[in-house]
Amino acid sequence: MADAAPNKVRWGLSNVHYAVWDDATKTYGTPKPLAGAVSINFDPQGSQNQFYADNVVYYTSNPSASDTGTLEIADISEEAMKDIFGYRKDATSGTLYEITNAVLPTFALLYQVEGDQTKMRGVRYNVTASRLSETRSTQTENVEPQTYSVNYTAVGRDFTVDGETVNVIKSSCDNAGDTHAAYDAWFTEVVCPGTAPASA
């Protein structure tokens, strides 16, 4: 079977998941869904560096320092509030509360985007979320859903690929061709460069 033709357009966002990094074991936990994703954006940070010699641009480097972005989501589960944002559940009062000195974990952020030929699945590997931004307003004649905005920063994580240590900020795969091991495993484990999916 030949690879699918390149996509002309991509659209939609679905299957947003997160997987918390365990610094003790140097592994990710099982991805968990973040249902109700509305939109996500990725803004690369870092500037192009140009070195001049002989009166021309002699060398150009494009450091991929980090990404910043925002995930807009309809609602956030209690589990995600505890896993990502450091909230705690009080057994005595039954309240979910936010502490001021919480140390927020890093996690992988996974997602899927549709296309006219293939679907693409992507991940940012080393993500930290900032405190939740939310807006609440009174109801009018037209009911408008109120959403949460999750601002985040993604930086690289070291992986060993072909014997070389490389710092990787993101990766992706699609469902083209005959081999779908990474694509099929995408939301059951965090697929990392240099490591075959456990289900392959």
Image: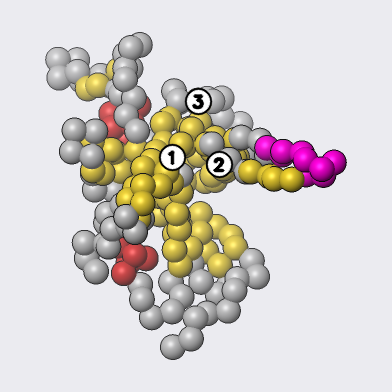
What residue is pinned by disc 3? 133
Q: Is residue 162 above or below residue 44?
A: below
**Where are the magenta residues, as a range?**
49-57
For image coordinates 50% across by 26% down, the residue present is 134
Q: Is residue 75 above or below residue 178?
A: above
Measured in 3D between alpha carbons, the distance from the residue under mark 2 to the one under mark 3, in whole angstroms, is 27 Å
Q: Quick one: 24 or 130, which is closer to the camera?
A: 24
What residue is pinned by disc 2? 64
Measured in 3D between alpha carbons, the distance from the residue under mark 2 to the one under mark 1, in whole angstroms, is 9 Å
- Could you tell which of marks 2 and 1 lies nearer the N-terminus? 2
Q: Quadrant of the N terminus?
A: bottom left
Around disc 1, counting alpha carbons within 10 Å, would you say few (fewer than 14), some (14 to 19), or many (20 or more)? some
Q: Amino acid at mark 3?
A: Ser
Q: Quadrant of the C terminus?
A: bottom left
For image coordinates 37% across by 65% down, the residue present is 183
Q: Amino acid at mark 1?
A: Gly
Q: Is residue 78 left or right of residue 170?
A: left
Q: Are marks 2 and 3 in contact (CB under 8 Å)?
A: no
What residue is pinned by disc 1? 156
Q: Would you identify the image quadrant in which residue 63 lies?
A: top right
For image coordinates 74% across by 45% down, the residue present is 58
User: Is residue 20 visible to us here?
Assistant: yes
Q: Secondary structure at mark 2?
A: loop
- Could you tell which of marks 1 and 3 lies nearer the N-terminus? 3
Q: Secondary structure at mark 3?
A: strand
Q: Which mark is residue 81?
A: none
For image coordinates 34% across by 38% down, the residue present is 107
Residue 53 colored magenta? yes
Q: Is residue 183 left or right of residue 114?
A: left
Q: Secondary structure at mark 1?
A: loop
Q: Would you identify the image quadrant in which residue 70 lies?
A: top right
Q: Residue furthest front?
A: 54
